[in-house]
Amino acid sequence: MAPTSFASSLLVRRRIATYFTGGAAGIPALVGTLTQQASMIHELSVDIRDGVRESSLACALLLPDEETDHLLNRLRELPTVVSAELA
């Protein structure tokens, strides 16, 4: 019987910070990408200010450790995203 690795299935809590343009219109694509990849999203906050070019979205989420880089890359591919990083 082959050994089973549980490490790949464990969910890890990560905090993600994303900066984006386009104001409130960019939020659905960001949240959609997060919910497609992450198991649970916690503490979602969005900061949109008048006169500021970039807005921010931050959240904590649960996802497998090996999926973190993939999620960040998917967020960075969205046309309105300026940056997406671990916070």
Image (cartoon, rainbow, N blue to C red):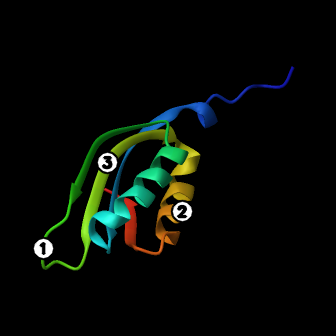
Are there few (<14), some (14-19), or many (20+) residues within 10 Å of tag 3?
Answer: some
Q: Give the percent coordinates (x, y) of residue 34.
A: 46, 50
Cα gap from disc 1 to disc 2, whole angstroms: 27 Å
Residue highlighted by disc 1? 50
Cα gap from disc 3 to disc 1, whole angstroms: 22 Å
Local SS, label 3: strand
Q: Nearer the viewer, residue 9 or 82?
A: 82
Q: Residue at x 33, y 70 (%)?
A: 20
Task: Please say if the residues under marks 3 and 1 sit with CB atoms less than 8 Å apart.
Answer: no
Q: Give the percent coordinates (x, y) of residue 21.
A: 32, 74
Q: Residue at x 27, y 69 (%)?
A: 23
Q: Give the percent coordinates (x, y) of residue 25.
A: 34, 66
Judged by depth in the image, the label closer to the viewer, 3 or 1, is 1
**Residue lying farthest front?**
25
In this picture, is 28 found above or below 42? below
**Residue lying farthest left?**
50
Residue highlighted by disc 2? 74
In this picture, is 30 found above or below 4? below
Local SS, label 2: helix
**Residue lying farthest top?**
1
Q: In the displayed structure, does residue 61 sit left or right of residue 36?
A: left
Labels 1 and 2: the sequence-earlier one: 1
Cα gap from disc 3 to disc 2, whole angstroms: 16 Å
Three-letter residue code for mark 2: Arg
Q: In the displayed structure, does residue 54 sit left or right of residue 73?
A: left
Labels 3 and 2: the sequence-earlier one: 3
Q: In the displayed structure, does residue 11 sit left or right of residue 24?
A: right
Q: Nearer the viewer, residue 70 or 52?
A: 52
Residue highlighted by disc 3? 59
Local SS, label 1: loop
Q: Give the percent coordinates (x, y) of residue 8.
A: 62, 37
Residue 84: quadrant of the picture: bottom left
